Amino acid sequence: MVRIAVTGATGVLGQEAVAALVGAGHEVTGVTRRDRGIPIIEGRGARAVVADVFDADDLARTFRAHDVVINTLAHVPVDMTAMRPLAWREDDKLHLEASAAIAQAAARAGVRRLIQESTVFLYPDNGSEWIGEDEPLAVRDRAFRPRVREMRAAVDFATEGRSAVILRLGQLFGRDPQTTHTLQATRDRKAVLLGKPENYITLLHHRDAGRAFVSALRAGSGFYNVGGEPITRERWAKDLGREAKAKGPAKFIPEITQAIVGTRLEVQRRSLRVSSVRFMSETGWRPTIGPSTPGWSRM
Ligand SMILES: NC(=O)c1ccc[n+]([C@@H]2O[C@H](COP(=O)([O-])OP(=O)(O)OC[C@H]3O[C@@H](n4cnc5c(N)ncnc54)[C@H](OP(=O)(O)O)[C@@H]3O)[C@@H](O)[C@H]2O)c1
């Protein structure tokens, strides 16, 4: 049994992580900034604590007597509002400031391991070539600075016998707001997908993401890709159509519109055929729900 504190515990990822950790027999504390987050965390079987994720002193008190901290904080804008740079302000602040405060507080509180959520979207478009963890990231644009700083904060934590595991998660799918929006657009026959049909996408169901945080407890320090078997976007379009019970596959946004979506959404146009072999062989984790698993949007 390990004592684990989870930040972002009321979010899409955090709730799955908490449930999976509790299910695996660990003692879990979920962190939320507001009272209304408490029943959500307790409903997943964990203890809830209200704390400010930008305040390292508050966090250090919260993290005391924990062995591991897992940071799943994010605030990703849903649908095409993500085209507006200002829509990412909160998400940026979480990755730039809260992640650094969490890593510092964890070190001060004597925590031995930090598990930090990250993303495969920082990899470059690699066509049909596989992408491993050693692939250089495409992060020269300022928009990616928060995610780079966050990784650095986690790497800096991993000194003096401490370990840091950075999970580069595939595109999440399941019951979450973004996928729900995509399924509804597919039913309404509205164009919703970015990229080209022949491009690759690496998906990760929320349930499998939650289980990945449990597996990460036994991984050595380092970066790990976490996703299912990559598929073409054409196949994803068909899977969405089937799951949505729509009249056809999900539709692609016309190229001319895709050209102006901006830096933040440009990453979703990239062909990302990401290999998770390192994480699977190190921890034994395996994806269990794929986009062709019937009923995945209700699991
Ligand atoms: N790899 C991926 O594809 C990926 C990664 C992440 C998210 N997403 C998608 O993005 C959509 C939104 O999910 P999300 O996880 O970003 O959002 P979320 O579930 O709304 O947020 C996660 C948690 O972060 C905390 N939080 C959010 N904004 C905060 C702020 N300004 N200050 C302090 N805490 C804050 C909240 O906790 P409290 O309110 O309890 O404090 C919240 O529960 C989903 O559809 C999800 O699947 C995708």
Image (cartoon, rainbow, N blue to C red):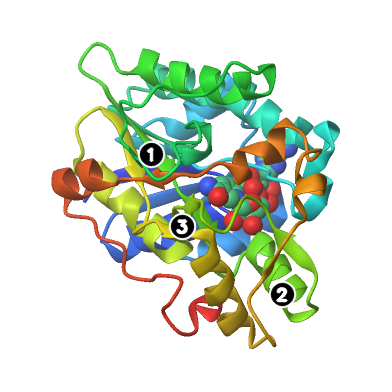
Q: CA distance from mark 1 to mark 3?
A: 14 Å
Left/right placement of residue 89 relative to residue 182 reads right
Q: Which mark is residue 228?
A: none
List the residue tagged with mark 3: 203
The answer to whether residue 290 shows anywhere in this view is: yes
Neighbor class of circle 1 (other Cα within 10 Å; few <14, some 14-19, many 20+) is: many
Residue 76 location, quadrant:
top right
Neighbor class of circle 3 (other Cα within 10 Å; few <14, some 14-19, many 20+) is: many
* Residue plotted at (38% across, 39% down): 167
Q: Position of residue 215 (x, y in %)?
A: 25, 50
* Residue plotted at (40% across, 30% down): 64
The residue type indicated by label 3 comes to: Leu
Counting residues from the N terminus, which is met first, the one under dot 1 or under dot 3? 1
* Residue plotted at (61% across, 31% down): 53
Height in image: 246 above or below 60? below
**Label 2 residue SS:** helix
Counting residues from the N terminus, which is met first, the one under dot 1 or under dot 2? 1
Q: Nearer the viewer, mark 2 or mark 3?
A: 2
Q: Nearer the viewer, residue 138 or 284?
A: 138
Q: Position of residue 201 (x, y in %)?
A: 48, 53
Left/right placement of residue 172 relative to residue 181 reads left
Q: Nearer the viewer, residue 79 or 154?
A: 79
Residue 114 location, quadrant:
top left
**Label 1 residue SS:** strand
Q: Is the Cβ of the residue at disc 1 closer than 8 Å to that at disc 2?
A: no
Q: Which mark is residue 167?
A: 1
Q: Is disc 2's CB within 8 Å of ligand 1?
A: no
List the residue tagged with mark 2: 186
